[in-house]
């Protein structure tokens, strides 16, 4: 009897560490400086809030009368930041003197660099560059960025639209403009996204949090993996 009682006590003690490890969440999941590296490597092969889209599953990609290759090309040239229109792919030199960038982090595993993007000194989001080493000032000015991510922050610039949808628009406007997405998710906490994907490296993604637009991401990377 004593042996059985001792065995039960030991089992209960061993179970405590397992139980206490459950339910932990990444407190940095909504921090752009922490999540951005994984987003560039793959959203949808690029997403810290991963879309789950498989690059080999071409049937899941979006082509309809509201979102297709021609529409996507127009969106890439229809990014309004304050009073400037920029295009992606693009460079700081292309975008003009209002823009600057500052190194944020390097994803050496995927050879991607993240740079914070500023408009007249005010942060608006971030861009990514394919490479392993931080760019010098001269190279940074002419480096081609294929991904851009714009955040909705109270002290950041609000006068931003991507594809005709403003960072301050209600999230429900997205499907009204572009129809059914490639993938849609909304959890019980109000975090979700609409993903419009042409291919594994060409997509438009609108993310919401708390019933408001949280982030707009656009990736226009060449499909042959060769920026040139």
Image: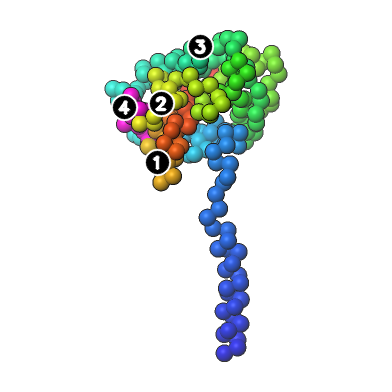
Task: Identify the residue position indicated by label 1 in the image.
Answer: 186
Residue 171 as seen in the image, left or right of residue 123: left
Task: Identify the residue position indicated by label 3 in the image.
Answer: 84
Residue 176's disc number: 4
Q: What is the spatial separation of the Cα atoms under label 4 and label 2, in whole angstroms?
A: 12 Å
Q: What is the spatial separation of the Cα atoms under label 1 and label 3, in whole angstroms?
A: 32 Å
Say which residue appears at 54% left-offset and 38% top-offset.
Answer: 30
Q: Nearer the viewer, residue 29 or 75?
A: 29
CB-based contact (under 8 Å), mark 4 and mark 3: no
The C terminus lies in quadrant? top right
Q: What is the spatial separation of the Cα atoms under label 1 and label 4, in whole angstroms?
A: 17 Å
Q: What element does badge 1 sit on?
A: strand
Say which residue appears at 57% left-offset and 85% top-offset.
Answer: 4
Residue 88 as seen in the image, left or right of residue 70: right
Residue interval drawn in magenta: 173-183
CB-based contact (under 8 Å), mark 4 and mark 2: no
Of all residues shown, which one is farthest toward the right?
136
Q: Nearer the viewer, residue 59 or 149?
A: 149
Q: What element does badge 2 sit on?
A: loop
Image coords of residue 61 (percent x, y): 37, 31
Image coords of residue 65 (percent x, y): 28, 22
CB-based contact (under 8 Å), mark 1 and mark 4: no
> How dense is the environment of label 3, judged by Cα within 10 Å: few (below 14), some, or many (20 and up)?
few
């Amino acid at each position: 009897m004593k042996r059985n009682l001792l065995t039960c006590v030991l089992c209960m003690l061993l179970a405590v560490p397992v139980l206490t490890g459950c339910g932990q969440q990444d407190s940095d999941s909504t921090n752009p400086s922490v999540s951005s590296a994984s987003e560039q490597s793959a959203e949808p092969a690029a997403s810290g809030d991963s879309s789950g889209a498989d690059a080999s599953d071409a049937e899941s990609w979006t082509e309809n009368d509201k979102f297709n290759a021609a529409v996507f090309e127009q969106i890439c040239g229809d990014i309004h930041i304050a009073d400037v229109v920029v295009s992606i792919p693009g460079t700081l030199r292309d975008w003009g003197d209002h823009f600057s960038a500052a190194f944020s982090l390097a994803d050496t595993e995927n050879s991607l660099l993240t740079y914070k993007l500023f408009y007249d000194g005010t942060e608006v989001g971030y861009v990514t560059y394919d490479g392993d080493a931080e760019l010098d000032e001269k190279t940074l000015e002419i480096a081609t960025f294929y991904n851009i991510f714009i955040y909705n922050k109270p002290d950041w610039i609000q006068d931003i639209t991507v594809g005709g949808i403003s960072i301050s628009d209600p999230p429900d406007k997205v499907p009204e403009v572009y129809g059914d997405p490639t993938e849609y998710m909304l959890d019980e906490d109000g975090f979700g996204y609409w993903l419009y994907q042409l291919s594994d490296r060409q997509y438009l993604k609108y993310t919401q949090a708390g019933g408001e637009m949280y982030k707009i991401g656009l990736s226009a990377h060449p499909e042959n993996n060769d920026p040139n």
